[in-house]
Image (cartoon, rainbow, N blue to C red):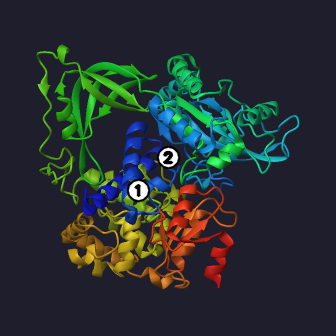
Amino acid sequence: MDKTAARQRIDELREELNHHNFKYYVENQPEISDQEFDHKMRELADLEAEYPEFADPDSPTMRVGSDLTQEFEQVQHKYPMLSLSNTYSEQELRDFHNRIVRQVGENFRYVAELKYDGTSISLTYVNGQLQRAVTRGDGTVGDDVTRNVRTIRSVPLKLKGNFLPEFEIRGEIFLPIEGFKRLNREKEKAGEPPFANPRNAAAGSLKLQNSSLVAKRPLDCFLYYLLAEELPTDSHYENLMLAKSWGLKISPYMEICHSIDDVLKFVRRWETDRKDLPFEIDGAVIKVDSISLQRQLGFTAKSPRWAIAYKFKAEEARTRLLSVDFQVGRTGAVTPVANLEPVRLAGTTVKRASLHNADIISGLGLHINDLVTVEKGGEIIPKITGVVLEERPSNSRPIEFIKNCPECGAPLMRLEGEAAHYCPNSASCPPQIKGKLEHFISRGAMNIDGLGSETINLLFNHGLVKTIPDLYRLETSQLVNLERLGEKSARNIINSIKKSIEVPWPRVLYALGIRFVGETVAKKLAAAFPSIDKLATATKEELTAVDEIGEKIAQSIIAFFKSEANRKMIEELKQYGLKLEGKEENNLESRKLAGKSIVISGTFTKFSRDELKQMIERHGGKNTGSVTGKTDYLIAGENMGPAKLEKAKKHGVTILNEDQFLSLINS
């Protein structure tokens, strides 16, 4: 793969993974299995390692997916709340073990635990009383959901015994299977759509604004990791046993394992016995027991090196393929969806499964009325994995991919080198219009409060909004009588729309939804082209001269501005006062870091990593994710990755601690 192809593939993977992170953590509506997500993440990590010049601190490989909302106060985690690396094979577990042995020798033991299918929580206790409950969020900042967690009966509000004066303990909030079934029966009786699975139900419950409603839901909680300035013992297992004596709910399914063979026995047993549990699990978690060894092993940018999650093989069932629907997304991509004869799989009834694109259909050789094998990847997303050819009925017929858009009738197109078919009618195709509106109002873009997918759908169906500029034409009187909206909600929406004209140029550019132009690319383009007029007239050569802008992105930008509908939209947005110009350099506090490439690693006491990154940008520096010979500074915090430190020393990079960095920019 040459550099241009690598750059394009990295951009594609980052865009896909950011999308799936949002669907999983924010909307609780994952579209792909954990295994598919991890495969894409691994591919991206490999490419970034091979081409360090394309490093980006905002890459999904450097971040933990976010579940933040606007409704709760956001709180910074005292200790970063990272995710675990996943594995799907026993050999990968052995590889994990061998890596640890190479670093610390063989004199250690593991703790094997179940991996609960719920939503992560961090509880802080001070003087024996529950002070705060915070969601994972983006790993650095989470939502304060204390008032909701206080309603969960298995979470003690006051401890007993000889507890630590202040500590944090992390765990998983989940819905037991019977409670989940009861909750769905109640929702169906009320005429409401049921939850897809217990994990979604638990996550959704924690985000309810009315804690009295949360109290009616049978949520439960297991706690599995204790953190404090001074821990009682050097054993993770013994610390949890002490926490249990304080009244905290610790899982009874943990085991001490003295070898990797003991770990594999634990994994094999629970892959079978999980069906007998009163709650759902999707794997096992393996941790080094010694806290001092955990500290020695350290962390990567997003996960500890001393722990790993083993994901169980997805359950499989056979059923009949009845028909195929074709759905159109925001970018115009057409996704085929299989309609199946209902079948029970992993505790839920499966009726539909994504087929992704024409190549997948062709590769499987699918026919209507085929008997197919269906797998629930990651226990959530149904996926057709094969055809039982020996049982193909005589009335089966090959699936024909549609030639015209099912929503607007426009002839579909397929770009060279891409798997998906696209509807080119972006100006008039309803799903594309609504998708672009939803992207425009999103937090990373214009951040318009009070508007979500349901409200956008409502406005579109009532003919109030057909284009992005239509948002700025809305009046309170048009909204007050709409379903689910009252005068207060209507006023809030209009005020938020008016406030959005203050959003700076880079975010407005991102909000326009140009294909392949994510947040990072939008920042680079906004810095290179100080106005939308200059960007609109830029040549391919001028665009590709910008750092990290390849030919694929350049062609997409040129095609966007060739569209008469897009040019009209921009002229209208100018009239409403949106910031469609303005160099980022104008906001610089200084140029002390101009031309400097800087890597941040570890955790810090005075500022979060994001705050340090913002400081770097405000003083003219460039954030990168990997240490190379071109790196000028490495800002080193606690628990930083040893590989980065070693690389920095090898390349002669200047290493600064937090105070030294602050002195540098304040000098």
Q: Quadrant of the N terminus?
A: bottom left
**For this view, does 243 lie left or right of residue 284?**
right
Q: Quarter-wise, where is residue 367 in the image? A: top left
- Per the image, label 1 sits on a secondary structure element best described as helix
- Amino acid type at circle 1 is Ala
Is 380 placed above or below 468 here?
Answer: above
* Residue located at (66% from left, 51% from top): 144
**Position of residue 213 measured from the top left corner of the image (x, y, whole percent):** 63, 37
Q: Is the residue marked by circle 1 packed among few (<14), some (14-19), or many (20+) residues within 10 Å?
A: few
Tell me the CA gap for discs 1 and 2. 26 Å
Q: Which mark is residue 333?
A: none
Vertical position of residue 219 compared to residue 300: above or below: above
User: Is residue 107 toward the left or the right of residue 344 in the image?
Assistant: right
Number of marks drawn: 2
> Which sits in the foreground, 397 or 608?
608
Question: In front here: 462 or 117?
Answer: 117
Between 222 and 485, the one nearer to me in the picture: 222
Residue 515: x %, y % from top left: 29, 61
Q: Marks 1 and 2: CB-CB under 8 Å?
A: no
Q: Is residue 86 visible?
A: yes
Q: Nearer the viewer, residue 323 or 569?
A: 323
Q: Earlier in the sequence, mark 1 or mark 2?
A: 2
User: In the drawing, does residue 351 fall left or right of residue 310?
Assistant: left
Task: Classify 10 Å Cα crowding around label 2: few (below 14), some (14-19), many (20 and above).
Answer: many
Q: State the residue position of label 1.
A: 49
The residue wearing badge 2 is 25
Which secondary structure, mark 2? helix
